[in-house]
Amino acid sequence: MSTEILMPALSPTMTEGNLSKWLIKKGDTVKAGDLIAEIETDKATMEVEAVDEGVVLDLLFKEGEANIPVNKAIAIIGDANEKVEVKKEAPVEKVIEEKKIEKNIETKIETKKDNIIDTPSPKIEEDTNLSSEEITMRQALRDTMAEEMRKDNKVFILGEEVAEYQGAYKVTQGLLQEFGKERVLDTPISEHGFTGLAVGAAFKGLRPILEFMTFNFSMQAIDQIINSAAKTLYMSGGQINCPIVFRGPNGAAAQVAAQHSQDFSSWYSQVPGLKVIAPSTPYNAKGLLRSAISDPNPVIFLENEILYGLKGPVNNDINFSIPIGKANIEKEGKDLTIVTYSIMLQKSKEAALRLKEEYNLDIEIIDLQTLRPLDTETILNSVKKTNRLITVEESWPFGSVGSEIANIVQRDAFDYLDSPVIKVNSADVPMPYALSLEKLYLPQVDDIINAAKKSKLYKINGN
Amino acid sequence: MKKLQKADYIKMYSFMLKIRRFEERAAQLYGMGKIGGFCHLYIGQEAVVVGILMTIDKNDSVVTTYRDHGHMIARGLDPKRIMAELTGREDGYSAGKGGSMHMFSKENNFYGGHGIVGAQVPIGTGIAFTHKYNGEKNICRTYIGDGAMNNGQVFEAFNLAALWKLPVLYIIENNKYGMGTSVDRAAAGLDLYKRGEAFGIPGEKVDGMNVFSVIEAADKAGKYVREGNGPYIIEVQTYRYRGHSMSDPAKYRTKEELDNYKQTDPIEIVKAEILKKKIATNDEIEKINKDTLEEIKNAAEFATNSPFPKDSELYTDVYI
């Protein structure tokens, strides 16, 4: 049987080529791997090898012939005695296939619900198992890690200063003493390396908790977080998951300036394959961290340094958890919705109190708790009730979590809105050092009040 | 050194040939537009992975770069499904979602197939960490291209592996060029195997065109690592006959250089040894050649007939 040698595509974009030189002639015997021709593409001249074996029965183009379409037969090989038949046109199959693909694809869904979670977020005021003692967020996080490490010896923690030093912010206090140095590991200051190592360990079945001293340093390791941790399940067709928690303080502390005060919530929330959590109280920190450690996917767990000392009651049941992907309605109200998360919950609550006292406005506050997957249902239901929305967060304004919420609300609740969605963010500049400028940079209670007033005073065709 | 049986010689020859024929067929399918994107061929380097394979335990783990087709074949994976991944079909090892550079087989302890230069090095170190954490006697073989040897995370991983005495064997496949930049234009100091010295990691340089040299080094290094002494580096001197990827004409090197390496073709070396030792006759070798060609032809056929992934697959495997 004869075989056609086709004009090859030698780059992802090549559609035709020039036959610059034949390296075989009629009657030659070729073996797999032999060079047969030089082909000139739009980019370069390349040698082409034979893949099939046989005698060259015919060369269909002369040296120097140009613009030969990809996949057109250029030579025939086969048995020496064979009669040669040349097809008129070889089909350019890739083009056909691409057309076929195009036809089959339905309209893409802009944002797809990642998971549907039926369990609502438990409400602290209805929790009958609440501790009488108030503990700090720091303790809540530490206790949860210890509880999970007792349950499953595949859980271990690594990071800078997590062991001997007891944690740069004392979140891992006492863990080395209880679990030993095989499970509580101090790393050198090499985020890229130890993040990749932890991702590899998670691929192989361990459940690492990786502490970034602060999330600012996660930028050193972001390739491993996104390209390796977040994408491998997809790239492996579902074979290799990455059960890892990346945790640590995120956002501004106090006067540590531009390189140490950055909010990464929208950065990580943009990435399919990651889940992103931002707790605001000891109570939800406990429930959410437990869910994060048990989750089979990579989870970004954004803590806040200023909140580490925040005290509150918790649920001490070692199986108490808060589902990922559920917001908490922190306070019900009818006049305007504030959607917020992490430390901005405290400022939003303060603002709501003053809005009640000074303007008699009844504010509804939604604490997102999870940023990805986003609980759009809770947000939309609230907007349908109050008809006004402001978002409050510490991140920069461009493409923030609030930007995405504004998009979703205008798309799915357009007719319910009585005023534009207003976003309250940090200033669109690097974080300054000076105390006065830092205060200006961060969203303050007055900013939230002004946004609420602006929303409430908005009139169609007016100001 | 490991004592090679007659069957080992045949196994080596068959695997190396299978890799070569596979890559040639992949190049053809690429030329026909059946394979898209980037496609990095392993032709010329076959002795490296096959040499290492001869010393491997099936419970050992492997992680490698994007030049991974040959690595998968050497791991005993099915050429049909590898080719089907290259053509982006549902029968591919990654169900058509990974492509040439991102292929995995968890059940065979093959952890990729990584597209980012150097990223597989900390990952392999982490897999080795897991072997140690679980108290297993296995090791992780982590392949590194010469290009990655100038990448910072590689040294971070070396430091961690030595610090924690992790069972990881680093194999530098030095094929002389990181894309189009030759090693001497990229690396200050050409002895890449010495780059673990500061961390106390022993290293060794090996002729990668000769599978017997690779086996000897891999055997010794594997034992060292398996006995709990920490990491070890083998630098294997090899050469890719083709360009960096399918669209690279490799004009940065001379034809003489390429021809020179072809004189020491790794497959021919094994074949000569087989004939010299009378392990098989010319006819028997010819039969292996024919069978291999046939197997790979079938793989190509399978890979071009396997269906494209279903549209609904776009949204699966993002989370579990």
Image (spheres, rainbow, N blue to C red):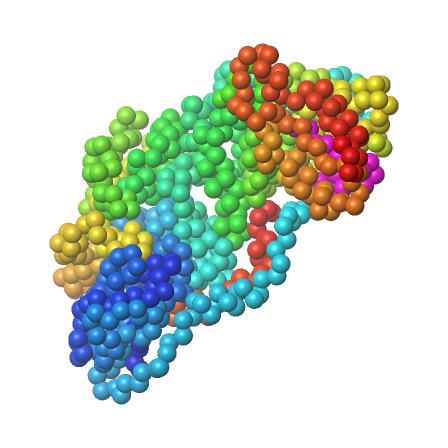
Q: Position of residue A366 (x, y in %)?
A: 75, 32
Q: Which residues are magenta?
A: A374-393
Residue at 62%, 18% in the rendered image: A440
* Residue placed most toward the observer, A275 or A99: A99
Does the magenta-highlighted stretch encompass residue A379? yes
In this rendering, position of residue A99 left or right of residue B189: right
Quadrant in the rendering for residue A120:
top right
Q: In this figure, what is the number of numbered marks? A: 0
- Residue A407 counted in the magenta span: no
Percent position of residue B98, x then y:
46, 53
Q: Residue at x 71, y 46 (%)?
A: A411
Q: Nearer the viewer, residue A196 or A447?
A: A447
Where B128 falls versus A6 (above or below)?
above
Specify whether A194 is left or right of A368.
left
Quadrant of the image occupied by residue A12: bottom left
Q: Nearer the viewer, residue A244 or A424?
A: A424
Question: Can residue B298 be seen at all in this image of the molecule?
Answer: yes
